[in-house]
């Protein structure tokens, strides 16, 4: 394809190549300084070749005392100990279940892609080179794969000034690839690939697997000797829309609107990036840049102090002494067991050595202040409680709050990009597996057909990912291992003191490796019936029944004793009344007449039985 030909995306190959060339050339100075920052972190690059030659000439070792690596690794250790997890919140009252599913889906993506390791790799380039970049894409298994972009391969709009690159007009990746691999992936572009390789430079200037571009602005696109091409994948704005193009020096391989969509179903750039610092010249750099000065002073000041202690300055104090060659006298004075000729003596330079030592101490203190202080690393107060260490760590992170806030915002944008990609690509039924803090498994079905028809006429789905409307945040929890151990000790002390602490609560608060198995066994044992307890319960039930029987018997006796006098009185009154009637001849005659009427007659009140 000719350079001036415009592709379907609207941008010509010439304009696309100019994006890469200006991204590499205009940021050449910053890239060279970032490479030096990486050398200082690694250590050997802290001495230049000329400085090493001077040390060898003085017969001094070219030792370097790397204080930068422990400082950066301490910050990375703090980030690794902190638990940063994504969490989804519902936007509507009816979306609480969807938010829970979205949270577990993001954690499934995080676990499967081993994003915890990717986060640390991003943090390393963030604090050393000053830029971290990541692209959310889909792998061959249609799983979401957040991938770190190497600093040397990341290209960006050099006119962008924001730390989060939100004002960049283009972002991309430029990577050297073998021409055969490119032709195999794009068979239709094989002719253009061969033409680009054959017209490439024969000079073996591409000796590293990364784009080359310096302050001069010269960018090599092909290497004929090694048959490699510089292939770029660039996402650029065309009006309000994001476009995507994959190309090399000889032609365009892919082009069109970005296939990645945001939450409003609009094409978006899948690359997320952040910078630690940005200076007024628009150069981006990390924490190592400020450490390089004190690190140089530590190495050079220590070397200078060693030189002061290894050599001696002498002077002639007696003009009448035998004449001695000055070099011979200097050599004798420099020896630990040397004999200084008569009439010569050492010059006292202890004040110079003390000054060098004082400056060395200040340089060490300065570089330690730039990194995590002992409070952050928990090296202060060996006998302090876990909560006290946690408070000191939080206070020590105050100076790093700004840059850590930028990195947290970068992680938040990465998580939201993962969720947007999940809503776009997870269209069919899918099962995900998540684990809780105690290691138990849970299976969640996404886009599961329920067998019923939905409101839109299609099948109704359970947990439809594309319809979940949630907000994503990140929760950062510091390492509380010491605090948890302290709380466990307090629980055990309370239990020993006699407080009613359930054994299950003590086991849950512990850090035993098989805590879940122990809890399950304790619960199963608690559910099984205890024969001794059953016998005890049966005995108690028998006593209750016996007590009830005795109570009923006592009540019956009391009633009998209470009604006995009443019955006797009633019987006596009835006998007396019957005697009166017999004397009058009434009842007997009525019996003879066959009368069956009871006495007293119904409806008439009888004589009182008591008190008559």
Image (cartoon, grey):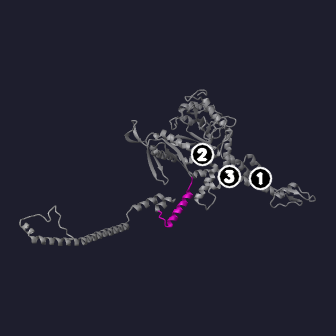
- Give the foreground label among 1 and 2: 2
Rendered image: mark on residue 407: 2
Give whichever of discs 1 and 2 has the lower sequence position: 1
Query: Relative to the observer, which residue lies in front, 301 or 266?
Result: 266
Label 2 Cα crowd, 10 Å radius (few <14 / some 14-19 / many 20+): many
Mark 3 and mark 2 residues within 8 Å of each other at the beta carbon? no
Residue 189 figure quarter: top right
**From this viewpoint, is residue 140 visible?**
no
- Kindly identify the residue that appears in the image at 47 percent across and 49 percent down: 434
Mark 1 and mark 2 residues within 8 Å of each other at the beta carbon? no
Q: Does 202 appear above or below 129?
A: above
Question: Could you tell me which secondary element the residue under label 1 belongs to?
Answer: helix
Position of residue 579 measured from the top left corner of the image (x, y, whole percent): 12, 72
Q: Which residue is mark 3?
A: 369
Give whichever of discs 3 and 1 has the lower sequence position: 1
Residue 548 figure quarter: bottom left
Q: Which residue is mark 1?
A: 304
- Kindly identify the residue that appears in the image at 14 percent across and 65 percent down: 599
Give whichever of discs 3 and 2 has the lower sequence position: 3
Q: Is residue 531 left or right of residue 601?
A: right
Query: Relative to the observer, which residue lies in front, 150 or 595?
Result: 595
Q: How many marks?
A: 3
């Amino acid at each position: 394809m000719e350079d001036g030909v415009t592709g379907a995306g609207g941008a010509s190959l010439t304009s696309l190549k100019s994006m890469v060339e200006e991204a590499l050339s205009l940021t050449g100075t910053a890239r060279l300084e970032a490479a030096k920052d990486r050398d200082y972190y690694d250590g050997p690059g802290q001495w230049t070749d000329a400085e090493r030659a001077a040390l060898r000439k003085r017969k001094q070792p070219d030792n370097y005392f790397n204080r930068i690596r422990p400082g950066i690794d301490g910050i990375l250790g703090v980030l690794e100990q902190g638990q940063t997890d994504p969490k989804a919140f519902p936007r509507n009252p009816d979306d609480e279940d969807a938010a829970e599913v979205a949270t577990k889906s993001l954690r499934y993506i995080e676990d499967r892609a081993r994003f915890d390791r990717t986060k640390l790799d991003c943090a390393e380039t963030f604090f050393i080179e000053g830029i971290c970049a990541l692209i959310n894409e889909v792998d061959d298994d249609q799983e979401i794969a957040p991938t770190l972009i190497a600093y040397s391969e990341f290209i960006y709009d050099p006119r962008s000034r924001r730390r989060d690159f939100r004002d960049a007009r283009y972002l991309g990746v430029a990577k050297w690839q073998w021409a055969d691999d490119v032709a195999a992936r794009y068979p239709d572009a094989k002719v253009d690939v061969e033409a680009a390789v054959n017209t490439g430079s024969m000079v073996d200037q591409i000796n590293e697997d990364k784009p080359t571009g310096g302050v001069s602005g010269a960018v090599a696109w092909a290497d004929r000797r090694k048959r490699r091409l510089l292939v770029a994948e660039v996402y650029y704005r065309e009006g309000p829309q994001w476009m995507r193009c994959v190309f090399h020096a000889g032609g365009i391989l892919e082009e069109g609107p970005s296939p990645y969509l945001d939450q409003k179903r609009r094409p978006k750039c899948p690359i997320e990036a952040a910078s630690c610092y940005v200076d007024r010249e628009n150069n981006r750099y990390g924490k190592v840049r400020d450490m390089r000065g004190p690190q140089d002073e530590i190495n050079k000041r220590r070397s200078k102090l060693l030189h002061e202690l290894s050599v001696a300055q002498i002077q002639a104090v007696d003009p009448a002494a035998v004449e001695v060659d000055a070099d011979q006298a200097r050599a004798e004075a420099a020896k630990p067991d040397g004999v200084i000729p008569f009439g010569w003596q050492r010059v006292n330079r202890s004040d110079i050595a003390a000054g060098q030592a004082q400056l060395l101490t200040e340089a060490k203190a300065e570089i330690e202040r730039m990194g995590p202080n002992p409070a952050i690393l928990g090296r202060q107060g060996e006998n302090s409680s876990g909560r006290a260490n946690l408070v000191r760590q939080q206070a020590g992170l105050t100076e790093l709050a700004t840059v850590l806030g930028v990195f947290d915002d970068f992680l938040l944008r990465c998580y939201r990009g993962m969720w947007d990609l999940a809503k776009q690509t997870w269209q069919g039924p899918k099962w995900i597996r998540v684990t809780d803090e105690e290691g138990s498994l849970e299976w969640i079905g996404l886009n599961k057909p329920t067998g019923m028809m939905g409101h839109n006429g299609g099948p109704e789905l359970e947990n439809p990912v594309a319809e979940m409307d949630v907000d994503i945040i990140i929760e950062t929890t510091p390492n509380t291992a010491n605090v948890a151990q302290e709380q466990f000790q307090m629980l055990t002390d309370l239990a020993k003191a006699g407080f009613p602490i359930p054994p299950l609560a003590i086991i849950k608060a512990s850090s035993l490796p098989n805590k879940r198995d122990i809890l399950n066994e304790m619960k199963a044992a608690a559910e099984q019936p205890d024969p001794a307890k059953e016998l005890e319960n049966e005995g108690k039930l028998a006593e209750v029944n016996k007590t009830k029987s005795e109570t009923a018997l006592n009540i019956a006796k009391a009633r009998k004793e209470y009604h006995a006098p009443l019955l006797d009185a009633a019987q006596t009154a009835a006998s007396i009344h019957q005697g009166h009637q017999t004397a009058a001849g009434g009842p007997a005659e009525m019996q003879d007449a066959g009368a069956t009427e009871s006495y007293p007659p119904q409806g008439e009140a009888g004589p009182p039985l008591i008190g008559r």
